[in-house]
Amino acid sequence: DAGVTQSPTHLIKTRGQQVTLRCSPKSGHDTVSWYQQALGQGPQFIFQYYEEEERQRGNFPDRFSGHQFPNYSSELNVNALLLGDSALYLCASSYGQGAYEQYFGPGTRLTVT
Amino acid sequence: TQLLEQSPQFLSIQEGENLTVYCNSSSVFSSLQWYRQEPGEGPVLLVTVVTGGEVKKLKRLTFQFGDARKDSSLHITAAQPGDTGLYLCAGGGATNKLIFGTGTLLAVQP
């Protein structure tokens, strides 16, 4: 049973560039949430996708956008990268929008220089 | 704004010692999860508690949800070096947006 997978593992970008991160949920899960984790801190909720729509959003600017595909996989896009966007980006999947147990992928380490 | 405060922030102990990590909030949560995260990896779910006063045990780890569902604790008995990591509590509400705590970094010295 495949768990949550994310790609790429690491990424280095320059300020002002755009980046796309990808996530495949755990088998049987249909909801994907994205989190940003700065070094030494707990993850911060970015947004959640269910039935291919953004259902909830945290306190992140519009530079952060996403998409969910019919196979439940998801992408996180960040435009006009800032140095402060450097972080570990985590994808979590769950079954059903109201479920409370989420399973996390290994994350994508984004470094903006 | 819902916040979860964890204490202590850092803990360095010797193998065999016991410890307790606390997770406190002024908000009520429908569920409370505990995760452990190792460097460069995603958080791994340890337990979910949903009922006020609920106690769950996972080998040497004991988790408790407060009666008012605003706080939780994690107790580790006879800590081992393999317990080293970042422990995170996370609260869930009506939807499954998780609010994470500030984290407790545990180091168990052999």
Image: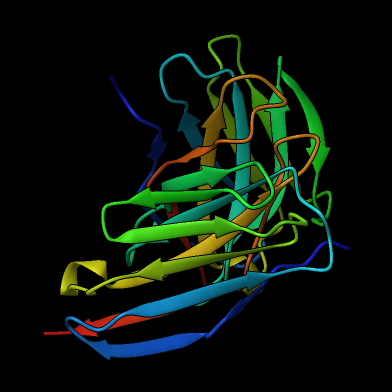
Q: Left or right of B38: which side holds A13? A: right
- Which residue occupies 43% across, 46% down? B45
Above or below residue A63? Residue A65 is above
Quadrant where the N terminus of chain A is found in the figure: top left
- Which residue occupies 32% across, 64% down? B38
Q: Nearer the viewer, residue A22 or A96?
A: A96
Above or below residue A72? Residue B39 is below
Query: Residue B101 location in percent, x, y?
Result: 63, 67
Above or below residue A96? Residue B28 is below
Res. A53 image quadrant: top right
Q: Left or right of B56: which side holds B67? A: right
Q: Is residue A35 visible?
A: yes
Query: Residue B87 location in percent, x, y?
Result: 44, 67
Res. B108 image quadrant: bottom left
Q: Nearer the viewer, residue B21 or A26?
A: B21
Q: Residue furthest right?
A: B1
Q: Nearer the viewer, residue A34 or A19?
A: A34
Q: Is residue A39 visible?
A: no
Q: Left or right of A23: which side holds B57? A: left
- Which residue occupies 31% across, 80% down? B18
